Image (cartoon, rainbow, N blue to C red):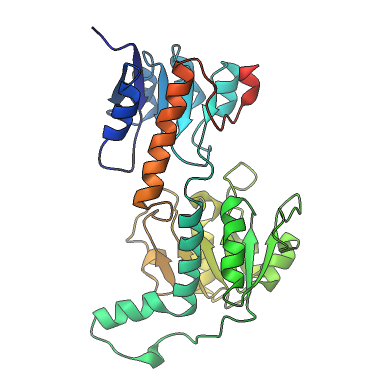
Amino acid sequence: MPNQYRVLITDRAWPDSELEREILGSIGADVVEATNQDETSLARQVQDVDAIAVCWAPLSGKTIRQARRCRVICRMGIGLDNIDVATATELKIPVTNVPDYCVPEVSNHALGLLLASARNLAFFHAKTKQGEYDLAAAPPMHRLQGRVLGLVGLGRIAQALVPKAQSLGLKVIAHTPSANDYGTGCEMVSFDELLRSSDFVSLHLPLTEQSHHLFCVEEFAAMKENAVLINTSRGPLVNHDALWHALQENQIGGAALDVFDPEPPDLSQPLFRDARVIVTPHAAFYSVEAVRELRSRVAHQIVAVLTGETPENVVNPEVLA
């Protein structure tokens, strides 16, 4: 007897889909995986599915319009910039995400990048592995106490980072369009003041048309010449050409990047080979526990919709009315 439902997983950052198959199999759902993530291929593969689970693959409006049977689109993550939510809403398809699954991991990773930059850990590691044991070769290091961490965006991850950074003696300031401190007690400042005042600038905001290349030539020129940019949010928030120019001109002190545009980046580019730049491979979200939680919650969101229930974290709730 054929399965009752068909669920498409467009892409994943883990070795297999066995957990999803186990959970979805309990309601007679067949899990299939996309063979290709380009728009033309996805538009063909979504035509006969009841649900779509998407990690990083782009789901354009054109693709979503081909998913005529689809009853839910689930983002396997937090950000929604790779899904045309407006088209899904027009077609009355609920879109879900998991906005709180990796808050400890990403906030810890951002703090780790800050500490690695401040203490030259990556620099010393690379040099000693090459047989060079020389404290004097590194850039100057300064005490953390009293230095300023500027948070651009103050969502769940940034809120979790505030007390961790404060425990090290850092002064934390933040900028959001709403100037809401969300109960953190964090000093809210203008964007210009944050750039002028911060020794570390950490990005924690979604990618939108307005935030695309938010950090470009003028923003780097406005930062302290010893400041470090930390990005664990979205790669396109930063214009990498402008970042490389700022480093060449010694306008800023360094960068620590976990996300890129495109991904994976071309690691042969001089930006990524510069000793002042720390690079990690979009790893901030990851822990065994976080990924298992993410996968389980997404699968149960799909189960809820296909069995007539309301899933958690519907980002376009108007379609449920």
Q: Is residue 52 above or below residue 265?
A: above
Quadrant holding the C terminus: top right
Residue drawn at (29%, 89%), measured in percent from left and top? 133
Residue drawn at (38%, 19%), measured in percent from left and top? 46
Quadrant holding the N terminus: top left
Q: In the rendering, at what x and y percent does residue 117 appear?
A: 47, 74
Q: Is residue 296 left or right of residue 18?
A: right
Q: In the rendering, at what x and y percent does residue 16 appear?
A: 25, 37
Residue drawn at (47%, 66%), measured in percent from left and top? 256
- Foreground of the two, 218 or 185: 185
Instruction: Give the residue furthest to the top.
Output: 1
- Foreground of the two, 140 or 216: 140
Q: In the rendering, at what x and y percent does residue 291 appear?
A: 38, 45
- Foreground of the two, 1 or 8: 1
Residue 60 shows up from this direction: yes
Residue 17 shows up from this direction: no
Instruction: Give the residue furthest to the front.
Output: 26
- Foreground of the two, 179 or 260: 179
Q: Is residue 60 above or below residue 193?
A: above
Q: In the rendering, at what x and y percent does residue 93 appear?
A: 54, 19
